[in-house]
Amino acid sequence: MLAFEVKLGTRGYLSLRNTDNGVRDLDYDIIVAGGGPAGMTAAIYSGRAGWKTVLFDPMGGGGQAGTTDMVYNYPGFPDGVSGPELMELMANQARAFGVKIEYEEVQKVVHSDADAGFKVDVGHEVHGARAVIYASGTLPRKLGVPGEEKYLAKGISFCATCDGALFRDKVVAVVGGGDSALTEAVFLTKFAKEVLLIHRRDEFRAGLATVKRVETNPKIKMLLSSVVESVRGEEVLTGVSVRDLKTGETRDLDVQGLFLYVGWSPNVEPVRHLVETDEYGYVITNEDMSTKTPGLFVAGDVRRKPLRQITTAVGDGATAAWSAEKYLLERG
Ligand SMILES: Cc1cc2nc3c(=O)[nH]c(=O)nc-3n(C[C@H](O)[C@H](O)[C@H](O)COP(=O)(O)OP(=O)(O)OC[C@H]3O[C@@H](n4cnc5c(N)ncnc54)[C@H](O)[C@@H]3O)c2cc1C
């Protein structure tokens, strides 16, 4: 069993020491939760400014950007940049500025009191922080149709970059009508012999250039004004039932892969009690990324904002780190 000794740290904040295995210091100036572009940027700025910083991410970082095959709209890369490569560059930059990156999932952030700062629980140990930057991004939404739970990871995927190659010469379906759905549908044509693009409306909510790439791709077949009603299979997924919303007709289609891009839910549970959220669950922050809890800053897709992109996540991360530094300096 873990035991902790609580001491007053050198800068007047709580120091938690695991007394079971001796002297390990679990204190940080800044703890960053989440290693997508927002968290990585916050860590780069915090580390570079000399704050003792750790970044926790159960995947070790990368975020959604790290699962994107190619990014064509990040400044400085006119021919595009691979998402995993971009995120690896950010992680290396953070490490070069002294940031520790650890494979941990933040379970709960507790604001102990105004002077002590925060306790950040990662499940098997608790860390102390004077300020926390929370940048956990969003989780993909499911369809909520019969059969879906059974075939998650057995044909149903949220990541074409991760799983697309498993469907070489097979028929796959992509559900959604935004930029992510369309971009990934095009990506999947590298492997699949046919990609069915199923969208509930009769027009897309994506950039014109992306729509054009879809419309001109001979491997993509569009099923507009259509919804998936159920999925079926045996050991793995073998098909979907699709209803045409205009005619009411339902068709059974044979597909071996189903990629879902129907929206995202903010991942706020560890800080829910410390922040305000909007009607969709996104964290409401001030312009400087501060929240109603002093010392807790929230950055990236998890917060309420008009545009969720790598560029805006990077901007949020920089602002959050700047604000955290200001907060720490003001407190002495
Ligand atoms: C398929 C797809 C294609 C995209 N293409 C583009 C594009 O071309 N250009 C563009 O600009 N944007 C693109 N985006 C959007 C872009 O990826 C996101 O806006 C951006 O990654 C958001 O960054 P973030 O750091 O806020 O969150 P994320 O990238 O989602 O990162 C959040 C991180 O937090 C971690 N995490 C979650 N919970 C916890 C926890 N409790 N404790 C610790 N860590 C936690 C996660 O593991 C994850 O690594 C795309 C997104 C998708 C899904």
Image (tube, grey):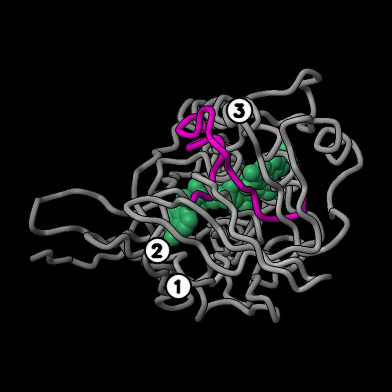
Residue position for label 1: 115
- Pick out the residue farthest to the right: 208
Q: Judge: label 2 CB < 8 Å from ligand 1.
A: no
Tag 1 and tag 2, C-beta contact below 8 Å: yes
Q: Which quadrant: the N terminus?
A: bottom left
Residue 28 drawn at (x, y percent): 39, 52
Residue position for label 2: 12
162 w.r.t. 88: above or below: below
Which amino acid type corresponds to the residue marked 1 in the rendered image?
A: Asp
Residues rendered magenta in the picture: 156-178
- Dot 1: within a 10 Å radius of its alpha carbon, few (fewer than 14), some, or many (20 or more) residues? few
Mark 1 lies on a secondary structure that is loop
Q: Residue at x 61, y 47 (%)?
A: 173
> From this viewpoint, is residue 189 visible?
yes
- Pick out the residue farthest to the top: 79
Q: In the image shown, does 93 or 12 lie closer to the viewer?
A: 93
- N-terminal label among 1 and 2: 2
Which amino acid type corresponds to the residue marked 3 in the rendered image?
A: Leu
**Displayed quadrant of residue 123:** bottom left
Residue 36 drawn at (x, y percent): 56, 44
Q: Nearer the viewer, mark 3 or mark 2?
A: 3
Instruction: Tell me: 193 left or right of 148.
Output: right
155 w.r.t. 226: above or below: above
> From this viewpoint, is residue 310 visible?
no
Separation of marks 1 and 2 at Cα, in angstroms: 7 Å
Residue 190 drawn at (x, y percent): 62, 25
Residue 180 drawn at (x, y percent): 70, 46
- N-terminal label among 3 and 1: 3
Which amino acid type corresponds to the residue marked 2 in the rendered image?
A: Gly
Q: Judge: label 1 CB < 8 Å from ligand 1.
A: no
Mark 3 lies on a secondary structure that is helix
Tell me, for residue 86, which label it has, or none: 3
